[in-house]
Amino acid sequence: MEAKKEWISTKEAAERLSVTTARVRQMVAEKQVTAQKVGGKYRGQWLIKASDIEKRLSKLSKKGVHAMRVKGRMTPNPVVVSPNTSYNEALHLMRSNGIKHLPVLNKKDELVGIVAHADMLEAEPSPVTTLSVYEMASLLEKVTISKIMTSPVYAVEEDCSITNAAKFMIEKEIGCLPVIRNGELVGIITDTDVVKTFVEITGGEQSGTHVELKTPDRKGEIARVCTAFANANSYIVSIAITYSDNSDYAYVDIKERGAIADALQAEIAKLDDIEIVEMRPVNSDELLSF
């Protein structure tokens, strides 16, 4: 039987974790895994301690985390109501649990609808009504969820990608999607969950520098940019690409950390046809209040 290796290559670690080699190097820089530098033709070559990778895999397995799948971002076992649930009871459930959506299940635990906080507000009497508070409460007590829920309801399987879930919400103009496994409700994912995922994958919670570049829209440009950042001793946290009306150019937003600004600017200046649009600290933006 072949003995387990104590150290593995960056590439092998990336394959085991299903991430990029850049992500493994970032983990090394953040001391999330033990590593030792080795010689070679290219800079940034590391040997990773195999046991550290196994520990991370074990934790991910126990948590059942799938970062870019709905199953890894949804709220499991959501609060639910039945079609016969009263308006007042449903509103109490929303307020006491701090939620804005309630899946509706029938007696067979089948998903038959969804009710949102906005639906609840629409069901209330007009603010200029002459009814007293007690009369309104009595009136709403007679209203059941079956009368205000949205049905049929859109839903997704738990293995649906976050990207597609977001696309479905935009297309259908809805704020959430119940999550199904083998025909049964197992969770719910909301637009807030999607936004949190976007912030995480773009490195929103990490410090560093935001760099916006204008690049030709052609094959190989991103590779050139990444090489320039690596030469400036930069760790790329995230990359996002958008396209302008002029199809000849693309805008590349990069969040990086570790590079000295002058060194990074000098490396980018060596790239023909690539322009720095903006470079500033990530935390330079402020939340305004009026």
Image (cartoon, rainbow, N blue to C red):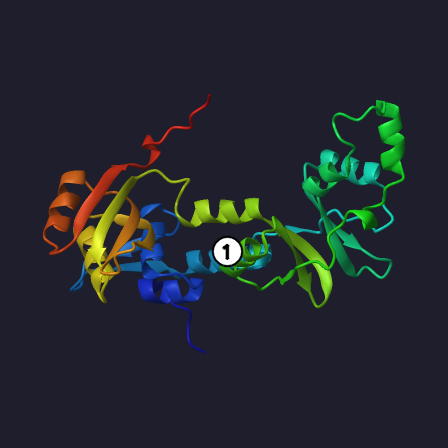
Q: If the image is split into quadrants, where does the N terminus sit? A: bottom left
Residue 6 visible to the viewer: no
Q: Which of 141 and 75 is in front in this view?
A: 141
- As drawn, 174 above or below 218: above
Q: Nearer the viewer, residue 289 or 201?
A: 289
The number of numbered badges drawn on the structure is 1
In the visual, does 115 lie left or right of 54? right
Q: Which residue occupies 90% across, 39% down?
A: 142
Where residue 210 sits: x, y (%)? Answer: 29, 41
Q: Nearer the viewer, residue 55 or 89?
A: 89
Q: In which quarter of the image is residue 221?
A: bottom left
In the visual, does 236 lie left or right of 142? left
What's the amino acid at mark 1? Ala
Q: Residue furthest bottom?
A: 1
Q: In which quarter of the image is residue 130?
A: top right
Q: Which residue occupies 16% across, 53% down?
A: 274
Q: Which of 289 and 189 is in front in this view?
A: 289
Q: Which residue occupies 17% across, 49% down?
A: 275
* Badge 1 density bin: few <14, some 14–19, many ≥20, Cα 10 Å: some
Where residue 196 sits: x, y (%)? Answer: 50, 45
Q: Which residue occupies 87% across, 49% down?
A: 84
Residue 289 visible to the viewer: yes
Q: For numbered disc 1, what is the local secondary structure?
A: loop
In the visual, does 252 lie left or right of 40? right
Where residue 199 sits: x, y (%)? Answer: 44, 45
Where residue 79 sits: x, y (%)? Answer: 74, 46
Mark 1 highlights which residue? 67
